[in-house]
């Protein structure tokens, strides 16, 4: 019964700004503060960043509008919404398969996301304890972890990765928090969390960036982030940039479609989509401007990879005045960002379980979070017991990837672009044009431009990037 599965109005966003805040909360996360600086660093900075901006503007933004629009037009979970639009448009309900890809991607991303967020909790604890110690000693303005050698500071990450019970505990705490918020519902849980956490996040981000700018090396940062070396822009790097743009804006993983379903009919979607894309990209850039000056100031390697934030930065915090306070606030900032994103990752599959399977919200959220916790364990063990396991060794780009990197890489480089491709084809070609136009609220040349980007540029660009990124040998 279609009516019975409709999302009930009382549990929607209380206002447009609540939706914008929650959607920005979904978008801004580990992807901005951890993954973007990491892969921009690994791919040589400038040219990658420029290509990334292109992906955001020409592919990401039109798709953000498309996905929110699908949710608001369908007003159900991701699968139900696509089916509803397909029905109204007279096309096959099998188009909902891309919503399935999205829900599965959200589930898989949640599993490894919680593992990384667990590291964040650990480091926030380390820095917090250090700060308390420094205050007790009457030396709150010295660097963090005084008295530890650089090797010992860096070794904390190696020690953490070898400590399976600790890793499991942190993963459990984070997944538990995510669950607790989603189980409360949209208004009382998700919206409230965003309302408190996002403003705190922005204050911390601006504060630490300004502090980093005064004590760090800005010249080297600007040279690194804004001097393009196009020889570094390989098809594999482009594929990574596209995957990152999609990941960062929470595209292809059911979050925006699901959040869109709770938006009331009066809200104008196009400016809202613009705000989400702009805020997300600005935060990624600011995160680069927050992290690299500190990295360069103490002569660390910007291409350190995933350990950049966890292994390199603590060394920098050790050498900067007020390092334990800044370090503590830095990890709290990442934690807030991660939590508002992980709730959106859990909400997509939960909304599906509630609406399509008829489960209660607390039960649905518990089962999905529990299952993601288990998959996360496999990711977590790939840093210790299963470090030799190579699940996708048959595929050259994943040849040497541990389980964590396979789940991360397969979702980011395959599932999200594939989902984005199908969303573009569906919205650009199959969905009823009048329905789409009415729902987006766009008209005239703006609608024509948006539709051109969705119908033509997105599928072609995403298709090509997907093909050559996944099979670089096709180019030779
Ligand atoms: N956008 C989030 C980040 O940048 O960390 C990650 C994410 C959240 C991806 C929600 C997908 C999603 F549905």
Image (cartoon, helix red, strand yellow):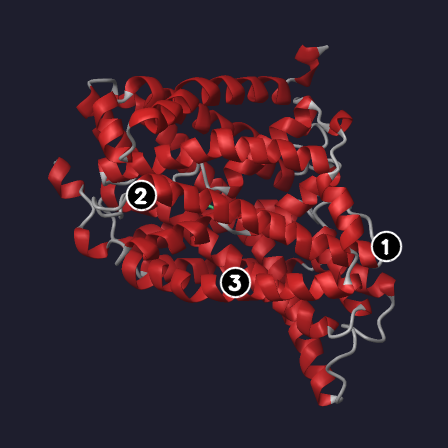
Question: For disc 3, does the CB lie below 8 Å from ligand 1?
Answer: no
- Quarter of the image containing the C terminus? top right
Question: Does residue 333 show up?
Answer: yes
- Tell me which residue sits at (12%, 40%) in the image: 3
| 86 versus 289 height, above or below | above
The image shows residue 454 at horizontal and vertical percentages of: 40, 24
- Disc number for residue 260: 2
For marks 1 and 3, the one nearer the N-term is 3
Query: Of the residues under marks 3 and 2, which one precedes in the sequence?
Result: 3
Mark 1 Cα shell of 10 Å, populated few (<14), some (14-19), many (≥20): few
Residue at figure coordinates x 25%, y 34% from the top left: 439
Could you tell me how far apart the alpha carbons at marks 2 and 1 are, in whole angstroms?
44 Å
In whole angstroms, how far apart are the C-alphas of marks 1 and 3? 27 Å
Residue 105: x and y, percent?
46, 37
**Disc 1 and disc 3 in contact, CB within 8 angstroms:** no
Compute the Cα span from label 3 to label 2: 23 Å
Circle on res. 299: 1
Q: Position of residue 53 (x, y in %)?
A: 58, 36
**Where does label 3 land, which residue?**
201
Rate crowding at label 3 as few (under 14), some (14 to 19) or many (20 or more) other CA atoms within 10 Å: many
Around disc 2, counting alpha carbons within 10 Å, would you say few (fewer than 14), some (14 to 19), or many (20 or more)? many
Sequence-wise, the earlier of marks 2 and 1 is 2
């Amino acid at each position: 019964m279609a009516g019975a599965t409709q999302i009930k109005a009382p549990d929607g966003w209380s206002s447009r700004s609540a939706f914008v805040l929650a959607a920005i909360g979904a978008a801004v996360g580990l992807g901005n503060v951890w993954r973007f600086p990491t892969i921009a660093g690994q791919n040589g900075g400038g040219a990658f960043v420029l290509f990334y901006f292109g992906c955001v503007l020409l592919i990401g933004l039109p798709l953000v509008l498309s996905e929110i629009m699908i949710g608001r037009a369908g007003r159900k979970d991701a699968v139900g919404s696509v089916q509803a639009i397909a029905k109204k448009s007279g096309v096959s309900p099998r188009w909902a398969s891309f919503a399935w890809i999205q829900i599965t991607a959200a589930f898989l991303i949640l599993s490894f996301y919680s593992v990384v967020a667990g590291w964040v909790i650990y480091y926030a604890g380390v820095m917090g304890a250090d700060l308390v110690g420094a205050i007790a000693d009457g030396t709150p303005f010295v660097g963090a972890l005084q008295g530890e050698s650089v090797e010992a500071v860096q070794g904390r990450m190696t020690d953490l990765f070898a400590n399976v019970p600790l890793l499991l505990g942190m993963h459990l705490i984070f997944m538990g928090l995510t669950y607790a918020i989603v189980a409360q519902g949209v208004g009382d849980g998700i919206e409230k969390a965003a309302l408190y956490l996002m403003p705190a996040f922005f204050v911390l981000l601006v504060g630490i960036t300004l502090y980093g700018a005064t004590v760090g090396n800005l010249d080297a940062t600007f040279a690194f982030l804004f001097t393009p070396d196009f020889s570094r822009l390989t098809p594999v790097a482009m594929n990574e940039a596209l995957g990152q743009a999609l990941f960062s804006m929470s595209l292809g993983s059911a979050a925006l479609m699901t959040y869109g379903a709770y938006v009331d009919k009066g809200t104008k979607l196009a400016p809202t989509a613009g705000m989400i894309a702009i805020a997300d990209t600005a935060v990624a850039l600011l995160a680069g401007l927050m992290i690299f000056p500190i990295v360069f100031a103490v002569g660390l390697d910007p291409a350190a990879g995933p350990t950049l934030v966890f292994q390199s930065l603590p060394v920098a915090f050790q050498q900067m005045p007020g390092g334990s306070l800044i370090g503590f606030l830095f990890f709290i900032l990442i934690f807030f960002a991660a939590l508002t994103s992980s709730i959106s990752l859990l909400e997509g599959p939960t909304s599906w379980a509630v609406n399509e399977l008829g489960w209660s919200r607390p039960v649905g959220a518990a089962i999905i979070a529990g299952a993601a916790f288990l998959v996360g364990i496999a990711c977590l063990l790939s840093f210790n017991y299963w470090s030799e396991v190579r699940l996708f060794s048959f595929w050259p780009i994943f040849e040497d990837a541990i389980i964590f990197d396979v789940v991360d890489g397969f979702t980011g480089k395959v599932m999200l672009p594939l989902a984005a491709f199908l969303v573009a084809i569906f919205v650009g070609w199959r969905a009823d044009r009048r329905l789409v136009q009415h729902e987006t609220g766009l008209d005239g040349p703006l609608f024509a431009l948006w539709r051109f980007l969705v119908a033509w540029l997105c599928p072609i660009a995403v298709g090509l990037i997907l093909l050559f990124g996944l099979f670089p040998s096709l180019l030779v």
